[in-house]
Image (cartoon, rainbow, N blue to C red):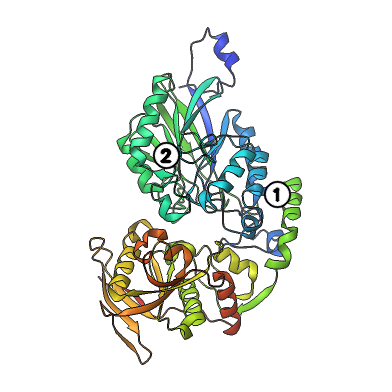
Amino acid sequence: MLRHILASATVLAMSGGAALADYTLTILHTNDFHARFEPISKYDSGCSDEDNAEGKCFGGSARLVSAIEAARARSNNSILVDGGDQFQGTLFYTYYKGKAAAEMMNKMGYTAMTVGNHEFDDGPEVLRGFAESVSFPILMSNADISGEPLLTDMIRKSVVIEQGGEKLGLIGLTPQDTDELSSPGPNVSFGDPVEAVRAEVARLSAEGVNKIIVLSHSGLAVDQRVAAEVEGIDVIVGGHDNSLLSNTIEGAKGPYPVMVGQTAIVQAYAYGKFLGELNVTFDDAGNVTEAVGEPIIMDGGVAEDGVTKARIAELAGPLDEIRNKVVAEAAGAIEGDRSVCRAVECAMGNLVADAMLDRVRDQGIQVAFQNGGGLRASIDAGPVTMGEVLTVLPFQNTLSTFQVTGATLVAALENGVSQVEEGGGRFPQVAGLKFAFDPAAPAGSRVSEVMVDEGAGYVPVGADKVYGVVSNNFVRNGGDGYKMFVDAMNVYDFGPDLADVTAEFLAANGPYQPYTDGRITLKE
């Protein structure tokens, strides 16, 4: 069948208002950018100018600008959308909050984006400032923002746009547990994604829109459920769990696109390492007849746009003194990849948990908890800069100390391993504690063999015994499902910054030798 692009409404007018051929659309997409405006290394952290010049780096806004321009030239009928989590991840966000993201997204000409959980990290106020600064709609269908005046006029459930002579309906979707993952405040609540999307699809369909795209920051599993349970969705552009979907890349989580019925689901990993490019063909009734494409890797073969590169360098100026300071030496690469630290004991988790416990052990603290989702990158061997530490720990969390019973510790561990099959960020990295878990057992009954270091050795946890614990303030306040810590005893949430504590521990134990020691074991 002959397929060509309906480039404008003029084509429809010339045909008397009737579409005489299929409609083809290129969907360019990103997700989970996390303030990686500069190129990144293979570890998803900072990459030196020298390595970038040698073609060893990936991503960065300057490459994305070039790649988007080239992709648009190939299509003539394209949109550019984002699956959420532009916020948080480097000093650029720490320093500029959402301003740098707004500037770059406007420059690239985004069509729309959905709200990721990290867009709420600094509360509704920063999200509002970002929304006021961007030239495109921000979408979120499954949240009630009617009680939050900062957002009621800023975020829409969906939007209809005219594109190439046709109407497209775009719907936003945000994690249902964003209130646990971030800081949306008391006036925003989140609901079931299936119900929310179904309602918007029905409304858009009633308006005569038959091409519907969901921008979903919910993870591949939720996207597949939404696609299976809601009729009328043509494409879901995903995010949140950093899924690499590809037909050519070894180790990809699935094909590009993943098809559920007639719905095409795509996602493009994270950190600007790829630009997703999906070419979709619709028939006259709005049904998808073809969906093909592949994420494009933003490696050294993609030229950096000179103007953008210069602007990023300008924005980086105030950050350089902080991040270029060498604070320690690593004797080996410190593994902090999310696929490891959200599933098993990892070297970065041991480093951070050990650092926390070391800092407050003299206060009677015995156990450290660090959520795996709070570890955002690895660190390679050699000199370690403060910038690298801040890339691993970008959230400006403080140390929290408190007391809970052994029964509460076990409940916390059960919460921590309850979403391991989904790569949940609540997975616990620990110090002063050993435990085993069975990922095949029902959630809530997976943990066993919990042992606490009592100084002279590890002894079984006592259900009624009170233990001193250190964590970060996000976890202590119930983040990532750790609600059992909210009512802890003798709480102090205002300790030193976790990144500073980790940097100082690295320096004091340099050259730091990364390790795992079996403190977390899988029970088959």
User: Callout 2: helix, strand or loop?
Assistant: strand
Q: Name the residue under label 1.
A: 304
Q: Is residue 416 above or below residue 74?
A: below
Q: Position of residue 33 (x, y in %)?
A: 56, 51
Which label was assigned to residue 61? none
Cβ atoms under marks 2 and 1 closer than 8 Å: no
Location of residue 196 in the rendering, given as x and y in whole percent from the top left corner: 37, 36
| Quarter residue 410 falls in | bottom left
Tell which of 174 and 278 is nearer to you: 174
In which quarter of the view is residue 420 placed?
bottom left
| Distance between mark 2 and mark 1 Cα atoms | 40 Å
Kind of residue indicated by mark 1:
Glu
Task: Report whether 304 appears left or right of 295.
Answer: right
Name which residue lies at 34% across and 90% down: 457
What amino acid type is highlighted by mark number 2? Answer: Asp
Residue 169 can be seen, yes or no? yes
Q: How crowded is mark 2: few (under 14 residues within 10 Å), some or many (20 or more)?
A: some
Locate residue 69 relative to residue 154 in the image: left or right.
right
Coordinates of residue 39 in the picture (x, y in percent) = 65, 56
In the rendered view of the protein, which quadrant contains the N terminus? top left
Point out the tag, 2 or 1, that comes first from the N-terminus.
2
Residue assigned mark 2: 144
Q: Which of 480 and 506 is in front in this view?
A: 480
Note whether residue 302 is visible.
no
Instruction: Please tell me whether mark 1 sits on a helix, a strand or a loop.
Output: loop
Q: Quadrant of the C terminus?
A: bottom left
Q: Where is residue 149 in the image (x, y as percent from the top left)?
A: 52, 39
